[in-house]
Image (cartoon, coloured by chain):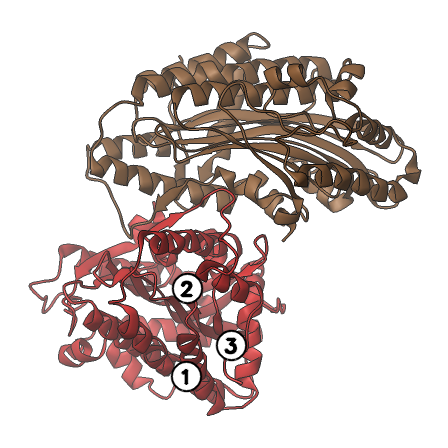
Chain colours: A brown, B red
Amino acid sequence: MAAAQLLRGLVRAARSPPALTLADAAGRRPLSSAPPELAAGRGARRAALAAAGTLGGLGLGLWRWQQAAMAASEEDEDEEELRQRFMAPPVSGLRELRRRRRELRSRMELLIMETQAEVCRALAALDPGAAFAVDTWERKEGGGGISCVLQDGEVFEKAGVNVSVVFGLLSEEAARQMRSRGKSLKAKDGKLPFCAMGVSSVIHPKNPHVPTMHFNYRYFEIEEADGTIQWWFGGGTDLTPTYLNEEDAVHFHKTLKEACDKHDLKLYPKYKKWCDDYFYIEHRGERRGIGGIFFDDVDSPSKEEVFQFVRSCAKAVVPCYVPIVKKHCHDSFTPEEKLWQQLRRGRYVEFNLVYDRGTKFGLLTPGSRIESILMSLPLTARWEYMHTPPESSKEAEILEVLRNPKDWVH
Amino acid sequence: MAAAQLLRGLVRAARSPPALTLADAAGRRPLSSAPPELAAGRGARRAALAAAGTLGGLGLGLWRWQQAAMAASEEDEDEEELRQRFMAPPVSGLRELRRRRRELRSRMELLIMETQAEVCRALAALDPGAAFAVDTWERKEGGGGISCVLQDGEVFEKAGVNVSVVFGLLSEEAARQMRSRGKSLKAKDGKLPFCAMGVSSVIHPKNPHVPTMHFNYRYFEIEEADGTIQWWFGGGTDLTPTYLNEEDAVHFHKTLKEACDKHDLKLYPKYKKWCDDYFYIEHRGERRGIGGIFFDDVDSPSKEEVFQFVRSCAKAVVPCYVPIVKKHCHDSFTPEEKLWQQLRRGRYVEFNLVYDRGTKFGLLTPGSRIESILMSLPLTARWEYMHTPPESSKEAEILEVLRNPKDWVH
């Protein structure tokens, strides 16, 4: 299976700081804790890039960047810095990212790596005894990623934070599908060099009084036949409670609004509505949760300004969510409340498998890492035929909000 | 919500014979056990048909049949016969079905109703103490159905057997999607009168040594602008074990083969392969189960011959499956075996929500009854990140068969 082939290294990391076990690529200074698959993995990345080189006669900017990334992976890394800042070494190599530090691709890759580490450490600190498993994986078509998963802890049922940085050549059809506005792109020989990177995460807690949280921030570049680079950002952070707690809802939305307002007062209302519209389970007439913000295909006012906005959003993830987890993770709950949580988990699965564009695109893309895509599914879920909560119950209260989204901060 | 609006009557039926509670349509002889919604439901059906009548100036055969069905629903039914033969009165009314007994639509509706009752009774007999809930529902665009669900019994986690008989007008696009070969159909004013009926069922047992079983037999008619009626059958029966039991697999496939062989020796091999190809979870590289038979869009050699074949298949459901349930429903099992069952249930959900044509078509069709469509989902399911069973384990054994389907009867 493609997913299994792609997995090159599986590393159980200590909670904080995470263990770093990727060996020196050339094998000159192997770490004793690095499993033998890793060296093969690094070799496989080189081989894949070399093979891709046969398609690389285009002499395009993105392709040159890939070659540079390959060279960087063969250099020694600053292990101490890596260990402190990230969950694993960046796909493009730290030295390469430093060398090209003014390029937006490098700054975005550092941002998603830092966000992954920040979120993982903040969550691990809340769940003593549990640890994030850190998997580094490579995509044979180009690039790779780092998946961090904490499963069956005391506080979290399943928490996944995934980084991916992938590049290569896209068909015109795939490029069109990738872009939500479906703008057509001019390809040379039917292929478009692309680079896509992002951090995405779903956190499913055990306690039904702690909500599920999802976030995702991503950046795309596609190079057209004439050398023009089309770029855009997408992302969002949203909350899915089992039971409504108005104070939590206000805190979550307010924190997001503050992050947005620093950049433009129009952003929060626009992206709040986009979130309510996007996370809609049409066949149920319900939203997946109480929303947050969501945006896609954003390429104005400028690359720098959108990046700064995305940075503010990514930095808001921990302050949005961690106080809510702390507040409720020791709340007592009944078996009936746990059951209602399981039914809501079922709806989460319905949204992700039936509607979510990212999941659908991922499942249909050859070479994508299935385990990282389906990491978003809860550990457990339930479907009861014709389940309807009694009127005026706490269960009916959240359903009402899922059917008719509220304005939480005005 | 549309699903809730569609539900007109909810009837808890005794196990065998099932209670019959649909009141006389004209209200002349209401049964004391009939809830008040039922009369409203019958009224709603009449209203819907009357409304549809404004579109019915086409004067087509199917439309005349609908009017006749409406008239029949206003006649007294032979309640004793209904009670013995079916789980609830047929959508088209027993008298109308008798009057038009030579028409294939009537014979198919009786067959699906009988199959529903046969299967429900056979299963209920295996799970003393549990009962099928019987819901009769109407579709405001035309037709309705009977959903029978047994949930959280001793033997069955969730067993659903659904009959639907729906008619009305389809857009050309919807008609094309309905037909797997995508054959184009000539419509008058862009609309095509259609009639679709079927019985479908998914049985999820509790014990991990008892496999999940699914079957579905269906019949479609679409009337083109020139009055030509396009018709076809589809269906299949397939098994999804948590653990492989070769003897069971052989029994299941052999029983299906015998049903097929009575009609044409070419059918079993052809439909066995179609089943393996259809129930394929592409992103996992696995089939959903160990197969059975599957066919769609079958309209040769003749309507009568295909109907007789479908009849044999429907009659084979109980002998295929019930002996396997009886054999294993008291087998002991470990918590680890239950966990593996839950992970396999997760894959079942993935297939049904991501790939199954019937589910996707249902979810996207306005006015469809969501609870009846998603009845196929298990009560509980589980997703673990990167779960891989040990080599040479019982879990690895079934995965091997799901990746490389076997020939069970040669």
Camera-side residue of A131 and A335: A131
Q: CA distance from mark 2 to mark 1?
A: 20 Å
Return the residue at label 2. Answer: B243
Q: Are marks 3 and 1 on the same chain?
A: yes
Number of the label disc, if any, that sits on residue B232: 3
Residue B279 visible in image: no
Residue A144 visible in image: yes
A177 in relation to A128, above or below? below
Element carrying mark 1: helix
B32 in relation to A124, above or below? below
Q: Is residue A399 left or right of residue A30?
A: left
Q: Tell me which numbered mark, 2 or 3, is placed earlier along the sequence.
A: 3
- In x, y percent, where is residue B14? 14, 67
Q: Nearer the viewer, mark 2 or mark 3?
A: 2
Please give the chain letter of the residue carrying mark 2: B
Please give the chain letter of the residue carrying mark 1: B
The three-letter amino acid code for the residue at tag 3 is: Trp
Element carrying mark 2: loop
Q: Is residue A219 left or right of residue B166?
A: right
The three-letter amino acid code for the residue at tag 1 is: Thr
Q: Are marks 2 and 3 in contact (CB under 8 Å)?
A: no
Q: Are marks 2 and 3 on the same chain?
A: yes
Number of the label disc, if any, that sits on residue B255: 1
Q: Nearer the viewer, mark 3 or mark 1?
A: 1
